[in-house]
Amino acid sequence: MSDKPRKSWPMPWKMGLGFGLGLVLGLLVHVAVGADAGWVQAFTNYVTTPASRLFLNLIFMLIVPLLFSALVMGIADMGDIRTLGRIGWKTMAYTILLSGVAVLLGLVLVNLLKPGAGVDPALAQQLLAQNVERSREIVASIDTQPRGMDVLLSIVPSNVIQAASDNGSILALMFFAVMFGVGMVLTDDDKVATLRRGIEGVFEVSMTLIGLVIRLAPYAVFCFMFNLAAIFGFELLVRLGAYVGVVVVALAIHMFVTYGIAVRMAGRSPLAFFRDIQEAAVMAFSTASSNATLPTALRVADQMGLPHKVSRFVLTVGATANQNGTALFEGVTVIFLAQFFAVDLSVGQQFMVMLVCILGGIGTAGVPSGSLPVVALICAMAGVDPIGIGLILGVNHFLDMCRTTLNVSGDLTLATLVSRGEQDDPAPVEGTRSAG
């Protein structure tokens, strides 16, 4: 008898198995007994939903120390301000380019296919009535969204502890981390060496703990997919089939065509790239949260051989600031609702919607359904009744899962693009730092 230890399945296979089992069993339950059955409600309310929330809470518990330490070390590893400036400008330029292509693609498809013009009025009234309370909550939250100069001012935190405790202030925490990293770069090595090792230790401890939590991912993925399928079933795809189809097709084209071209430009095989990121993609689809997928994305970037100074900086910033899927979804949804309410938006108005969607994609919280208040805000700006967001709430979670997959894939695409020509440099020697 062989004494060789049994090889464990790779994590993407385990997550794929949990995904498939949860989806199939959930659909069977939905078809056989329905979502209203007592034991189904009890199972989802007391087993699968608490289990999935516990998994997300464990991840979010570690996000703040991971995000802070990863971003600070990513900047500190650059060694000088010139490198930070070069990588920062490349990141911003590629982010705006990819987001612009995503929104433009979505607007072209939604204008060509016009899904909002063919919605059954009776179905629309039913959907609006079912989601009226949630719609009012989202519309009411518009007043709490920063606008104009307040958007810029909100990025600079007056209280970094408060920013760290508020998902909506994650950009403010990132700003503090960037400034902290810049301060470390500009300070003499011997004065920050101990601090540097301490922050690196926080990063390693965070990744170690998250590695333990990620072992629960296949079970959490099963719970996510079972809930989704058992509660909504096939209805998820047929209630607003044209709208869902336009969003999904646009997301798929952007992911496999735009990202494929971008990765090829960076000198990598698109097929190899999509194979390498499959674990992060499954995690993103299951959790519908860019922030929750950040630890997995960082590990995938290491496996791909991307420089640490690039991957830590780009992926950490990208989890909030490079959300192509969110920007695309926001653009398509606004035009869809405009078509439904027969609001004729001119080319100029749609161009403004495109610009606001790009900015909205940068500032949207990387948590489930974080884009809905932004959609309502853009609708109000475009003269479209924001209460119409109730039309899409029934299918929003599925679309949230799809666009988060694109967001995370876009972060890894962005890191691949920025990494071209960059290498992990050795620790800077005393006297080699530059302030300009």
Image (cartoon, rainbow, N blue to C red):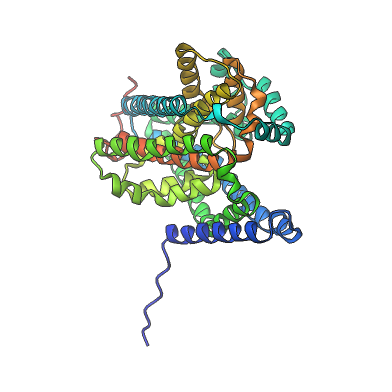
* Residue 357 x, y percent position in the rendering: 49, 23
Q: If the image is split into quadrants, where does the N terminus sit? A: bottom left
The residue that appears at 29% across and 29% down in the rendered structure is: 431
Residue 376 seen: yes
The residue that appears at 63% across and 32% down in the rendered structure is: 391
* Residue 394 x, y percent position in the rendering: 63, 39
* Residue 72 x, y percent position in the rendering: 45, 35
Residue 368 seen: no
In this view of the protein, which residue sits in the foreground, 126 or 382? 126
* Residue projecting furthest to the bottom: 1
Location of residue 436 (image quadrant): top left
In this view of the protein, which residue sits in the foreground, 321 or 78? 321
* Number of marks: 0
The residue that appears at 58% across and 50% down in the rendered structure is: 234
Above or below: residue 260 compared with residue 80: below
* Residue projecting furthest to the right: 38
Q: Relative to residue 228, is residue 45 drawn left or right?
A: right
Q: Relative to residue 369, is residue 281 drawn left or right?
A: left
In this view of the protein, which residue sits in the foreground, 355 or 383? 383
* Residue 192 x, y percent position in the rendering: 43, 35
Q: Relative to residue 176, is residue 82 drawn left or right?
A: left
Above or below: residue 29 compared with residue 164: below
In this view of the protein, which residue sits in the foreground, 218 or 349? 349
The residue that appears at 59% across and 57% down in the rendered structure is: 27
